[in-house]
């Protein structure tokens, strides 16, 4: 997939919801999806940053996106169902969902991680992706070709010291992917996968590896071929997989 070259209109006519769309990989994916024809529903906590991504997409000539300021840390079933209803009302359909929002505190021993921290880590990184996917599932199932992509993490796939609750939550996405994909085995139009971007120059990488210069790492844009492949029709046969980016 590293050398995958998507056609310019790969996502034309599709509506894709991106969480964590205001920065990092979520921002890069939103721009890439719009550049390939998708109407992107931008979701994040920070409205000002969402507006900046909105303006970038419009300035680049992409389809006008939609903005959804939303805090997944305090989401419940009712608010997520309301969000799904708003998506249906304003956009009419949903063909893809990229979970890129995340919560991270710091690298610390398990003995110093608190119950409150774990509750937040699980809620944002695992529970909210499950609950949001469930809420929009009826919309996704109406689409002729729909894709859900969870953003995994290297240390969730291969756990190591100090990553604690963040790694545990991220590893849960891989299990969730397999279970849900198994339950959707009879569906030819909806697929679910986990994508691990790996070492990419993001704010999280800078916080966890402060000694590594950002310019020595791949940019978020460098891993977009994997995102586009899994979100578009060329990735239809990839189901229930954990896919690692290699740049």
Image: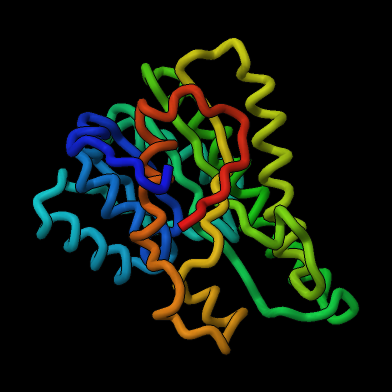
Residue drawn where x is 30% and y is 35% of the image: 15
Q: Relative to residue 27, is residue 78 drawn left or right?
A: right
- Quadrant housing residue 1: top left
Residue drawn where x is 48% and y is 32% of the image: 136
Q: Position of residue 243 (x, y in %)?
A: 57, 43
Does residue 205 appear in this view? yes
**In the image shown, does 88 or 103 lie closer to the viewer?**
103
Residue drawn where x is 20% and y is 47% of the image: 35
- Figure check: 222 above or below 98: below
**How has the structure been colored for display?**
rainbow
- Quadrant housing residue 174: top right
Q: Position of residue 82 (x, y in %)?
A: 46, 40
- Figure check: 145 above or below 26: above
Q: Residue furthest bottom?
A: 211
Q: Position of residue 103 (x, y in %)?
A: 60, 66
Q: Relative to residue 199, is residue 146 drawn left or right?
A: left
- Figure check: 46 above or below 34: below
- Quadrant housing residue 38: top left
**In the image shown, does 222 or 32 lie closer to the viewer?**
222
- Figure check: 45 above or below 127: below
Q: Position of residue 124 (x, y in %)?
A: 62, 58
Q: How many numbered marks does the figure carry?
A: 0
Q: Relative to residue 200, is residue 9 drawn left or right?
A: left
Q: Relative to residue 159, is residue 188 drawn left or right?
A: left
Residue drawn where x is 28% and y is 41% of the image: 5
Does residue 94 appear in this view? no
Q: Residue furthest right?
A: 111
């Amino acid at each position: 997939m590293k050398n995958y070259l998507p056609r310019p209109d790969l996502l034309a006519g599709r509506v894709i919801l991106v969480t964590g769309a205001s920065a990092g990989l979520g921002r890069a994916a939103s721009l890439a999806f719009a550049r390939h024809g998708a109407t992107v529903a931008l979701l994040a906590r920070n409205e000002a940053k969402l507006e900046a991504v909105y303006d970038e997409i419009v300035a680049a000539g992409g389809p006008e996106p939609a903005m959804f300021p939303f805090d997944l840390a305090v989401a419940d079933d009712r608010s997520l169902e309301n969000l799904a209803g708003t998506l249906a009302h304003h956009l009419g359909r949903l063909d893809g969902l990229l979970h890129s929002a995340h919560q991270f505190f710091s690298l610390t021993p398990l003995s110093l991680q608190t119950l409150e921290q774990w509750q937040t880590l699980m809620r944002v990184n695992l529970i909210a992706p499950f609950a949001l996917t469930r809420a929009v599932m009826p919309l996704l199932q109406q689409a002729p070709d729909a894709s859900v992509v969870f953003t995994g993490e290297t240390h969730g796939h291969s756990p190591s010291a100090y990553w604690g609750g963040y790694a545990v939550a991220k590893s849960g996405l891989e299990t969730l992917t397999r279970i849900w994909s198994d339950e959707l085995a009879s569906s030819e139009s909806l697929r679910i996968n986990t994508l691990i971007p790996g070492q990419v120059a993001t704010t999280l990488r800078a916080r966890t590896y402060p000694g590594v210069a950002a310019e020595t790492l791949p940019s978020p844009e460098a891993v977009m071929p994997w995102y586009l492949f899994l979100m578009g029709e060329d990735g239809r046969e990839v189901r229930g997989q954990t896919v690692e980016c290699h740049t």
